[in-house]
Image: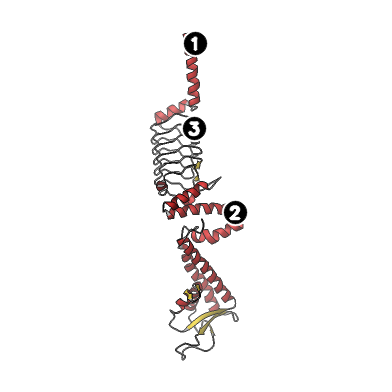
Amino acid sequence: MIARNFQIVFLIVVIVGGAASAADPTHVKKLTDTKICPGCDLSEALLSTANLAGADLTGANLRNADLSGAILTEALLIGARLSGSNLKGARLAYAELNLAGLPDADLSDALLDKAELSQAYFSRTKLAGAKLFGADLEGAVFEPISLPDIQSISDATGLKSLTYHESPSALRLLRKEFKESGLQNKQKEITYALMHQKRLEVGKIEGFLRYALFELTSDWGLSPFRPLLLMALLVLPFAVVYAGTIVRPIGSAGIWRVWDKDRIRQDIGTASPVQLNSANCSFAWNALYFSIISAFYVGWHEINIGTWIGRLNPREYTLRATGWVRSLSGFQSLISIFLIALAFLTYFGDPFE
């Protein structure tokens, strides 16, 4: 009877033990003895509070493993499968978790300072209270059910490259938290991540227009001064075209010098407009000057930047265009108006939210 009872108790222990941990016992022993166990099957392993600092667990299967409170500092977990694992309070500073799968994992209160998390998969992951100071999140799929410490993730790198597969809700919530915390630059990084992802999801034509108009020009508001730089850089190529029309005029299409009728020095200038050519002017200077005033031909009522720039000219004349040159000048002005408006809106507001 005693022997039978002992067998029953032993069987219960075996069954309970098997249910509690499905990990390969030889792999568990290898890990605890050597800390080198790449590709090991450690699913459902009981490793709570274990000291695994510097362990090599590259590509290991750690599904539903209990690693709560474990020391995994500088551990190699590249490509590790950690779905459903309990990493609550684990110390993962400087750990390499690139390409790691973390769906349904619990990383609450975990320490992930300086951790490598590029292209990691956070789906339904619990991150409440987790610290990510200096962590690398380049290209990570970010869909957790709770957010980490906001101040710590604001110090992480790669925020603008975060992405999602199913829902942008977590990224939108993170952006909202950054905004409420006064972290405007980080807020704009998340805006970039969201808008970049949305651009990739739309059709080719719309995607190209979104890229050309907003991403290339301002990174969706992340680079508010880039539109002004682009406007300045466009002055030179337009000036080259204008110089060509001065050197080789084609019919009546060209650039003309028009003297003010009410100018003070009536002895200087002509009564009729004069078409510019290489013989009567410096084509390089006049082409550049016309390109500048065309770029800044922006204003409202009496307020016109191009007019103000024109007043820098010591002589009382203006440059005007005819034919297709006039149309080109108008196109340059439209581009400049768009770029100035974009710079103003992205610097002082949040037009893409």
The disc at residue 202 is 2
Q: Toward the viewer: 229 or 214? A: 214
Q: Crowding near pointer 1: few (<14 within 10 Å), some, many (20+)? A: few
Q: Residue 338 at x, y = what percent? A: 52, 66
Residue found at the very far front of the displayed protein: 180
Pointer 3 residue: 64
Q: Secondary structure at mark 3?
A: loop
Residue 57, label in figure? none
According to the picture, the residue beneath numbered tag 1 turns out to be 4
Residue appearing at x 43%, y 55% in the figure: 184
Describe the element under mark 1 as helix, strand or loop. helix
When the figure is inspected, residue 289 is found, relative to residue 22, above or below; the finding is below
Residue 69, placed above or below residue 133: above
Instruction: Identify residue type, mark 3.
Output: Asn
- Residue 158 is at least partly visible in this image: no
Q: Earlier in the sequence, mark 2 or mark 1?
A: 1
